Amino acid sequence: MLPTIKDFEAKGWFLSQEGIDLIANENESEITTLDDFIAIAKDTDLRLLTKDGFNKTAEKSLKQIPSPVVLQILEVKNVAMPSIHQIDDQSRLLSITFTDGSKKKFKGVEIFGRVNSVK
């Protein structure tokens, strides 16, 4: 039995039914639990698995992002350095572009200090 959309949303994954079916059809023999689905979704482009992301009511603007929520990193840029020399670690101010799988992109900036898990 496939996990429901509500099961995924409780863990922060805002997938569409088509996305759940895509994972199930491509990995029939490997998945049995919700955690198996999530493990496969981690290695998949979120834009293939959802259309609306966490903001399913597009006519309303959200005041805050729901929690928990899974976002995927699309791009990391060091805006403190010229784009030609992005290697130097001495001066670093990262601008990170995220997606929730919808067409919207979210920007984040490393302003309160170094985030060690983003290299």
Image: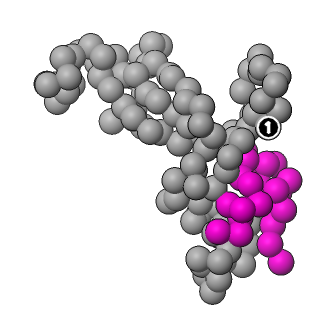
The residue shown at (51%, 23%) is: 107
Q: Which residues are magenta?
A: 1-22
What residue would you read off at disc 1? 56
Q: Is 101 covered by the magenta stretch?
A: no
| Residue shown at the point (69%, 41%) measured from the top left | 53
Which quarter of the figure has residue 22? bottom right
User: Is residue 42 visible to the viewer in this orientation of the structure?
Assistant: no
Q: Going by the image, does 77 lie left or right of 21?
A: left
Residue drawn at the location 82% of the way across and 32% of the way down = 57
Of all residues, the one furthest to the left in this rendering is: 85
Q: Is residue 31 depicted above or below 4 in this figure? A: below
Q: Is residue 8 magenta?
A: yes
Quarter containing the C terminus: top left
Question: What element does badge 1 sit on?
Answer: loop
Residue 41 vs 69, above or below: the answer is below
Q: Residues within 10 Å of mark 1 (few under 14, many from 20)?
A: few
- Name the amino acid, label 1: Lys
Q: Position of residue 23 (x, y in %)?
A: 63, 69
Residue 106 is left or right of residue 118, and the answer is right
Q: Nearer the viewer, residue 66 or 54?
A: 54
Does 90 sit left or right of 109 as displayed?
Answer: left
Is any atom of residue 103 visible in this view?
yes
- The image shows residue 89 at horizontal and vertical percentages of 21, 25
In the picture, residue 94 is in which quadrant? top left
Q: Position of residue 15 (x, y in %)?
A: 71, 52
> Which of these two is toward me, 109 or 23?
23
Above or below, 12 against 87 in this view is: below
